[in-house]
Amino acid sequence: MKKHNFSAGPCILPNEVLLKASEAVMDLNGSGLSLVEISHRSKDFVAIMENARALALELLGLEGKGYQALFLQGGASMEFLMAAYNLLEKKAGYINTGTWSDKAIKEAKLFGEVVEVASSKDKNYNYIPKGYAVPKGLDYLHLTSNNTIFGTQFKEFPKTDALLVCDMSSDIFSRVLDFSQFDLIYAGAQKNMGPAGTTLAVVKKDILGKVSRKIPSMLDYQVHISKDSMFNTPPVFAVYTSMLTLEWLKNKGGIAAIEEVNDKKAQLLYSEIDLNPVFQGFAKKEDRSTMNATFNLADQDLKETFESMLQEGGINGLNGHRSVGGYRASMYNALSLESVGVLVDIMSEMERKA
């Protein structure tokens, strides 16, 4: 049976990407060697890395605007540390909208003063804060664009005279934005871009080298830029598969085209959640994520029946995070509208049975 993969990450990837990646694992470009056994200094892999970095900037509309794209390791969790290491001299501001923001704040406090500009912790992060004032004199303002666990998403971004840093791990490449408003963007690959193992960092080059501290080489963006994102042995499979995914997205028509599909998927599922009395949405409607829809059963006595129906329907990865409970449907770029339709049909059938 075909599985409909709503997993929050590592998550669904396009079938054609998986096929090409699997072929390269056996033989890359007819070389007689596997992708995972070639030298990362070989012409084949250098071309892969250059193409992946160029595609990232092209799709984000940042070509020729002073940005560098890097494929690094350590996940967004390492970027929590790296962002502060490279940019925090005196004081940074953070908007706390969930677990990952909270973790980023913890790391930043190792390097300087951190101001929590706004927080939605009072309602278990089910909304995006509004009406706050961003203090003057910050080295940077950090936010998380999409909150995978709680199902909320920034629809507008704050204006500030500070550098703007954004963790886009779970919604990068999913919607059209003016990406030039950000000075540093980072994203773990395993949501919308590729398999676990690499992290995309897109940084404006001229913001670097301003802090007084010495930065270890592996944590210094300038070092990675100077070495064309190959200061150390890169995760070749993750970078290659990310490159294939970016090529797939470009061939689909880029971010604008995929955004149309993502909006249709979200509208279909949220409409069912709102109209079906069996279910209750978690996030505030105006702040709902198009990537991660969080919801629960109105009557927990129906849990066994509903989950049995999900299993029969081939629905995978729908369980919510322990912080929220209930269910979470992650609708990343590669998930089809058809898969969302299957889930909605099961939810509709659940209403008839209830």
Image (cartoon, helix red, strand yellow):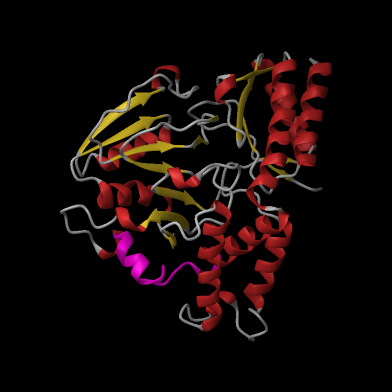
Question: Which quadrant of the view contains residue 206?
Answer: bottom left
Rendered position, 281 above or below 103: above
The residue at the far bottom in this view is 32
Magenta residues, as a range?
Answer: 220-237
Seen at 58% across and 75% down, the residue is 35
Horizontal and vertical percent position of residue 141: 33, 37
Reply yes or no: does residue 322 show up in magenta. no
- Please state, as top left, top right, bottom left or bottom right, where the C terminus lies in the image: top right
For the residue pair 104 and 88, the one nearer the viewer reads as 88
Seen at 57% across and 67% down, the residue is 240
Residue 173 can be seen, yes or no: yes
Rendered position, 97 above or below 75: above
Question: Which quadrant of the view contains residue 268?
Answer: top right
Horizontal and vertical percent position of residue 193: 58, 54
Seen at 48% across and 81% down, the residue is 39
Rendered position, 337 above or below 26: above
For the residue pair 189 and 37, the one nearer the viewer reads as 189
Count of labels in the image: 0
| In the image: residue 55, left or right of residue 350 | left
Horizontal and vertical percent position of residue 47: 54, 76
Rendered position, 245 above or below 138: below
Seen at 59% across and 20% down, the residue is 285
Reply yes or no: does residue 225 show up in magenta. yes
